[in-house]
Amino acid sequence: MNKKTKYERIQQFLTDIGQPNYRFKQITNAIFKQRINAFEQMTALPKNVRDELKKEFGENVLSIKPVFEQSSQQVRKVLFEISGNNRVESVGMKYRAGWESFCISSQCGCGLGCQFCATGAIGLKRNLTADEITDQLLYFYLNGHSLDSIAFMGMGEALANQQVFGALKILTDSSLFGLSPRRITVSTVGIIPNIKKMTSDFPQVNLTFSLHSPFNEQRSNLMPINDKFPLDEVLTTLDEHIQVTGRKVYIAYIMLRGVNDSIDHAMAVAKLLQNRGQWGHLYHVNLIRYNPTVDAPEHYEETDEEKVQMFYKELQSAGIHVTIRSQFGIDIDAACGQLYGQYQTKKNL
């Protein structure tokens, strides 16, 4: 059973202590319009109400605490402490055009064991609650950042955690974050039942599918989840998503040197996406340069730039929409799971 979110609990608490309905609006205005974190500073509320809120919910609205940060010119990476002495990471990226993008975590660790992923090496500690997911964004927002776009591409497999749907509800609620679903992207390795749930419940939220190999056997080696949800079944589900929503589906392809960056791989990716019917043009491939990490189960290296360009040209000439993703944060180990690993090592020294 889903736990009530903090916003629902605050609303219920105000009713319980006999406060008028508009009090909740005063609180959400303080948080989302005035960017106030401390209940004490919400001066639109009577002193006795502030005191009651502090007693019930603690001093601050935020339930997670930053414990470690790294920044470079365009990237700010934060490690948060959550209950149970666990930690999760979030990344804020500032593009030169001025808009800001955030990459947030949905799980502490991940249980899927993808071979190239630092988070997979941690294993799954636990799912995050809807509050813990949205509080990562609230932290940046309260600190003056603009939530221009959001991606569930941090630690964990978003669609393996049902609480992600509760988080999406909070983020798109006009009385709370009020974000357009089109500014939110959920990334998945292909959890079919919850892709279908996205189609029905959040059709306007962007979906990204992590492909990383067009060959079934190799994909299963790199990403064991492929045995449970095989590639062809996932693509059929994504075809249905496109037909229902009329929205693009993004295909993420991390390029690993000597593993999945050959011309044969490029041709096979093109073949997978060609001939998918009248909706095929709504698939868009993002080629991603691998961010080498010492914490992954296997050691992989970044692909040569010529191979990236070759792959790009092969897809483009086959009529596939393709982009080479901008690289951020290599200088601060911004691959998910890396900051967590560093912090654990430092703590244990």
Image: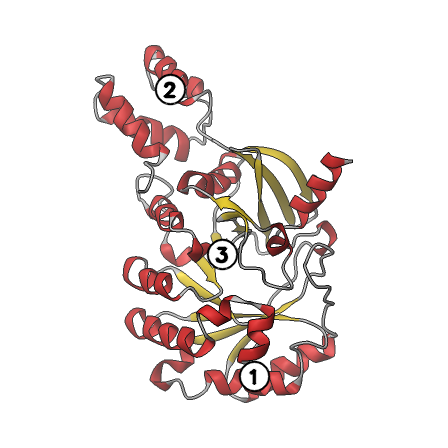
Residue 23 vertical position relative to residue 265 in the rendered view, above or below: above
Q: Earlier in the sequence, mark 1 or mark 2?
A: 2
For label 2, the residue is 56
> In percent of the image, x 62 and y 87: which residue is there?
264
Q: Is residue 196 left or right of residue 64?
A: left
Badge 3 crowding class, 10 Å Cα cut-off, few under 14, some 14 to 19, many 20 or more, is many
Q: Is residue 90 visible?
A: yes
Q: Is residue 244 left or right of residue 145?
A: left
Mark 3 touches mark 2? (CB < 8 Å): no
Residue 286 vertical position relative to residue 39 in the rendered view, above or below: below
Q: Earlier in the sequence, mark 3 or mark 1?
A: 3
Badge 1 crowding class, 10 Å Cα cut-off, few under 14, some 14 to 19, many 20 or more, is many
Mark 1 touches mark 2? (CB < 8 Å): no
Q: Residue furthest right?
A: 349
Q: Position of residue 223 (x, y in %)?
A: 56, 67
Q: Position of residue 247 (x, y in %)?
A: 36, 69
| Residue type, numbered disc 1 | Leu
Give the label on residue 157, or none: 3
Q: Position of residue 46 (x, y in %)?
A: 32, 13
Q: Quadrant of residue 282?
A: bottom left
Measure how far apart labels 3 and 2 are at the Cα level.
Answer: 32 Å
| Residue type, numbered disc 3 | Glu
Measure how far apart labels 1 and 2 are at the Cα level.
Answer: 56 Å
